[in-house]
Amino acid sequence: MKRFFLIIIMTLIVVSFSHAEIDLSLAHEMEHSIKIGLQWLVEQQEDNGSWQYYPAITALTVIAIINSNPNISYQFEPVVKGLSFIASCAKLNGSIYTDNMPNYNTSICLMALKEANDPQYYDIIDRGEKYLLGLQIDEEEGYSTDSLYYGGVGYGGDQRPDLSNLQWALEAMLEREPVYTDELELNKKEIINIEEKKLFFDKAIIFLQRCQNLEEYNPESYSENDGGFMYEPGISKAGGSTSYGNMTYAGLKSMIYAKLDKEDPRVQAAYNWISNHFVVETNPLLGNQGLFYYYLMMAKALTAYDTDIIVGDDGIQHDWRAELANQLIKIQNEEGWWQNENGRWWENNKVLVTTYCIISLEEILKG
């Protein structure tokens, strides 16, 4: 049966692209890279429809498959089975997880369910969104707007908030276009969702500011003034409150998702940091730690920012799509998978890292 689906993937995976800056030859190489990566991923699916029995990893794989071609839908059997596993992990309180990290898993599972746009999962999506709304730290938990944690989201439970979890939640809360048979029901649901989500995004911006090294908007003592982002207020995975790549890309895309204008000083400060630290061979300040998460955040953030060429203070121009695509293709294993030799943040997990890379390539092709 898996062999049958591999044949389907070989014939269907042709990612449509429209961006004039992508060289035709490179685009074909990217499509081939995606194809063999998806072939390998489909072979890894478990009998229960999951990938590695883990909701978030299953969801990322489903996203990678669905995004590969508009002809692939939730009716494609590996996707059907993956979505069914995700649904089986849905709890009564709206969370979607098995035994740990409820926010992380719920956020990414919601992203997959929305990409599938299968009407049978709309109720799970609605409950999941309400669950995420309830996780945000605000007045209901006794926090005021001057708290460093205000507006943030963590892994769930009593764990403190961080930018990585917040960026997943923000992406999960982006609007979808569900198909309701009752127009009145649609209007009522969407009005409620839009109002609640706007508050969610507005509060998130407050937390984002506390994670950004930008004194005009973050006067805290730990704040520097280079425009980059740290993991959580006053704490960076690069040491101290130092700005670093993963979180600066995550911060940039989060501000755009939260509807800050492209010309907003906070957005421009993050983009300027990125322009002066752009590199694809390594993760600035972290080496190969979290390298593939860095690639994923880069692709998503710069696609959202909608730029073609990045120019730093040194005047060097970077075609970020071509540089990132060539790097990903170069380091792909001939069997189709990717893996980080550094195991921090699960990046020695071939399935997880392969989903990161395929989704990154798909983002690049979106143009």
Image (tube, rainbow, N blue to C red):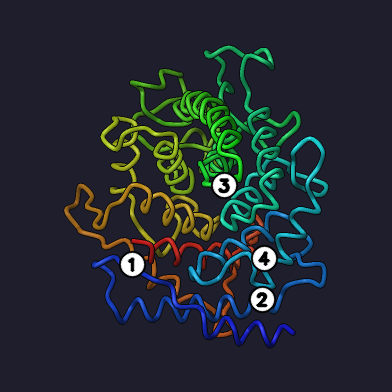
Foreground: 240 or 281? 281
**Cα distance, mark 2 to mark 3?**
27 Å
What residue does disc 4 label? 349
What amino acid type is highlighted by mark number 4? Asn
Which numbered marker is on residue 42? 2
Instruction: From the viewer's side, name the closer residue of 107 and 241.
Output: 107
Estimate the x, y position of residue 254 in percent, counting from the top left.
Answer: 46, 39
Mark 4 or 2: in front is 2
- Which numbered disc flags the more N-terminal residue, 1 or 4? 1
Residue that label 1 marks: 323
Mark positioned earlier in the residue sequence (1 or 2): 2
The structure residue drawn at horizontal position 33% and vertical position 47%, both measured from the top left corner, is: 305
- In this view, the residue in front, 82 or 124, is 124
Q: Residue 201 placed where, x, y %?
A: 50, 29
If you read the primary sequence from the N terminus, does the residue marked by circle 3 or circle 1 appear first? 3
What secondary structure is found at the residue carrying circle 2?
helix
Q: Nearer the viewer, mark 3 or mark 1?
A: 3
Residue type at the position of mark 2: Val
Q: Is residue 139 left or right of residue 362?
A: right
Q: Are marks 1 and 4 in contact (CB under 8 Å)?
A: no
Q: Pointer 3: what residue?
A: 178
| Real-space CA distance between mark 4 and mark 2, rounded to the nearest whole angstrom | 16 Å
Q: CA distance from mark 1 to mark 2?
A: 27 Å
| Element class at badge 3 | loop
Query: Residue 110 location, x and y as percent?
Result: 63, 48
Separation of residues labelled 1 and 4 (CA atoms): 24 Å
